[in-house]
Structures are given as structure tokens and as C-alpha cells.
Image (spheres, rainbow, N blue to C red):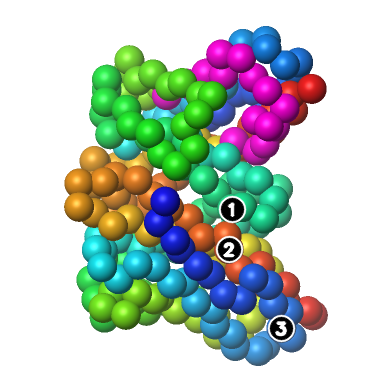
Amino acid sequence: EAQVTQNPRYLITVTGKKLTVTCSQNMNHEYMSWYRQDPGLGLRQIYYSMNVEVTDKGDVPEGYKVSRKEKRNFPLILESPSPNQTSLYFCASSLIQGINQPQHFGDGTRLSIL
Amino acid sequence: ILNVEQSPQSLHVQEGDSTNFTCSFPSSNFYALHWYRWETAKSPEALFVMTLNGDEKKKGRISATLNTKEGYSYLYIKGSQPEDSATYLCAFNSGAGSYQLTFGKGTKLSVIP
């Protein structure tokens, strides 16, 4: 089954404790992206990647890192999480590098930073 | 940060009514406009990706139009059903070397049986 898989689905952690949210897709998609969703603000793009070893900042990259060492994986790294990063996070992927293809979303990861 | 506006923010309609809502985006540069349907506790699902001025797309009772010159897209739902209740998101890419996708805040539709 074609899908985007995020892990974990839920995480409660404390300020300053490094964490990684994994994202994997099995559709051979070039484009992958991370979004955060906050009430009243909609989906905001954190980082995106057009292919292996190619990443770029979205609208809200501060406090996050990403890597794209393999085509299928695009982990989101919070080196020193803070409470303002408490949010619902979505990973998404799409075919080819152009942004004229629909995004396929994972099920989301709800992070709470205490 | 590009400004993508959706209106209304929310609306309630009776089952069987037809409805429409708007996505506005900068008209100066345009590459693609996406529409997604997002049900509570699920992930967004793609409805349409539109790239050409004047484009019209249809999927069942849902259709969308695109006017890139004036910077807006309409989403129409004909004969709304309770299962249409969801938040509808649009997302815009300006092209010009950017692969960033900017989402609007969405229109939350509630269909009353």
C-alpha cells in the first residue's frame, strides 16, 4: 500500500531533550516536506526536499533540522525542543520535483514539549 | 511569506444545499494551486492540483475553478452531504524557482443533516 509513515504518532517530552520524528514513503517520490499545524494558523511549511541531499527552508524553519540521505526518508530533528514547538506535525511527499503534483500526507505526529 | 487567504473561515449549510468558497493568492507569479480536504482526526487528502488559468476540475459533486490573472480559485460542492463536513485547504506555489507550498488557513464546512 502506497503510504507516508510517520513515527511516533504521539510524543510528550521535556524542553531541551533532542528528538527525531521519522518520515518514510514507499512511493519513490522525489519531493518531501514537513509542516506544522497550529490552531488559527493553518499548515505552515518547515522544510522541504526536492531530492536526495537537497533541502530548503520553508516559512518556519527555526529550531528544526532535516536530512535527506535516502530518497524514502526525511527525518525532522528538534535539537533542543522548546514549548513553542508543541504542535501537530505532518510529513508529505509528492512525485517529481515540480510542485504541480498532489501532496500525500502522513497521519501526523502530535508533539507536546513541556 | 506569501499571503494565501481563504473565505469564509467557516460555514454551516443544510444537507442538499450547494455551496462554494474562495481561495485568494498573489496574482503576480503563479505556478500551481492545490485543494485538499481535511477531515477531523485524519490527514489532508488531495482534491485537485490546478496549473492553467481558466482550468476547471471536477471530482463527483466537487469542482474547482482557477483565475490566475486575478488571483483566486473557487471550490464548489453541489448538494452537500454530511460526509462533506471537513476543512478545505488551498495551497499556492508561485514558481519563479521556488518549490515552497503556502497553505491558506482553510474553510471549515459543517453540513447539517
Up/down of B59 relative to B87, above or below: below
Is A38 placed left or right of B48 in the picture?
A: right
Outermost residue to the left: B96
Q: Tag 1's secondary structure?
A: strand
Circle 3 sits on which residue?
A: B13
Residue at mark 2 shares a chain with residue at mark 3? yes
Identity, as a three-letter code, of the amino acid under mark 2: Gly
The reply to whether residue A10 is in sight is no
Circle 1 sits on which residue?
A: A42
Residue at mark 1 shares a chain with residue at mark 2? no
Identity, as a three-letter code, of the amino acid under mark 1: Gly
Using a 10 Å C-alpha cutoff, classify the residue at mark 1 as few (fewer than 14 neighbours), some (14 to 19) or many (20 or more): some
Residue B17 locus on image (x, y percent): 65, 89
Residue B33 locus on image (x, y percent): 35, 63
Is B84 placed left or right of B101 in the picture?
A: right
Instruction: Please check the rendered image and state whether residue B37 is part of the magenta-colored stretch, yes or no.
Output: no
Q: CA distance from mark 1 to mark 2?
A: 7 Å
* Residue in the picture at 67% in, 10% down: A17
Of mark 2 and mark 3, the one earlier in the sequence is 3
Residue range in magenta is A74-89
- Comparing A23 with B90, the one in front is B90
Identity, as a three-letter code, of the amino acid under mark 3: Val
Circle 2 sits on which residue?
A: B106
Circle nearer the viewer, 1 or 3? 1
